[in-house]
Image (cartoon, rainbow, N blue to C red):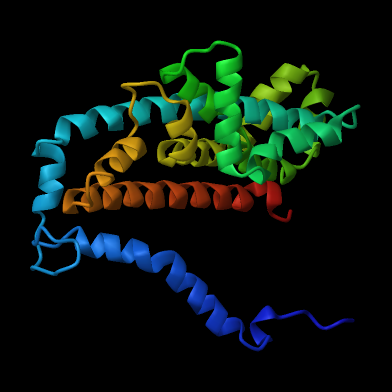
Amino acid sequence: MAARLDLRRFPGFLPITWLCLVLLYAPLIVVMVYSFNDSNSVTLWGGFTLRWYVEVFTGPEAPKFKAAALNSLAIAISAAIVATTIATAAATAMLRSGQFRGKSVSFVLINLPLMVPEIVTAVASLVFFSAIGFQAGYLTILVAHIVFCIPFAYLPIAARMQGIEGAYEQAAQDLYATKWQTFRLILLPLMAPGIMSGFLLAFIISLDDFIITNFVKGAGIETLPTAIFGSVKQGIKPNIMAISTLLLLVSVVLVTVSYLLGRKGQTTPTNKGT
């Protein structure tokens, strides 16, 4: 039997790993640390304070950021619901409908937004909306986010469905359940952890998106990422670091919950021995 390949034993693997981790997370740590800086300077430490977090909710820019945050939440919730619904239907068709013409092409189309650079998706969305005369605004952001979020919702849903044995559905149909009853009463409850995981992942992707939103949003429509970008163009201020830290924490919490829900699906009785 061939020996198992262990990448950790390759020369230079550990230093390269640490270098990648530093490059990825050091900027985030710097932003978080300086969001507690009592100085107006973003480079000189002036002591610990929470006043920038208070200013986020009570400062002169608070109404702008509040409106942008509400827009982001509304768009993210709507996009996640629609994307998760489509992803659930797609996963059911791909994994429970057997072989059909165009299955491979359908799989590629579902996952295409993951492979195409986001800037290309943003430009293509802008050109498409302009070509059909669709006025840029709230609805264009929502449509673009739904399309972009579908593969992110699809992956955990499909992974969960692959772990569900077909014997449950066969037993239900042997007891004269219709296909709809089998799906609604048997398959859907077993898929619930994957569906929730996909919903949360789609939600956070939509909430954090900047590139696509910045291209397809209309005048006067701001989401939280675009509002932050607009403020940064006027100069980096400590309250921007506080908002960024809060947004980062929300993202980390939701991604963690999505991961835990995905793992929960792997410990259900469907995967346990009898």
Q: Quadrant of the N terminus?
A: bottom right
* Residue 231 image point, x, y percent: 25, 41
Q: Is residue 131 above or below residue 51?
A: above
Which residue is pictured at 36% across the width and 64% down the height?
A: 27
> Exactly how many numbered labels are in the figure?
0
* Residue 24 image point, x, y percent: 45, 65
Which residue is pictured at 40% across the width and 21% down the height?
A: 218
* Residue 236 image point, x, y percent: 23, 52
Q: 92 or 212, which is in the foreground?
A: 212
Residue sticking out furthest to the top: 133
Q: 108 or 92, which is in the foreground?
A: 108
Quadrant of residue 75 within the rendered picture = top left
Q: 162 or 164, which is in the foreground?
A: 162
Which residue is pictured at 65% across the width and 89% down the height?
A: 11
Q: Is residue 262 above or below residue 13?
A: above
Q: Is residue 194 visible?
A: no
* Residue 21 image point, x, y percent: 47, 71
Quadrant of residue 12 within the rendered picture = bottom right
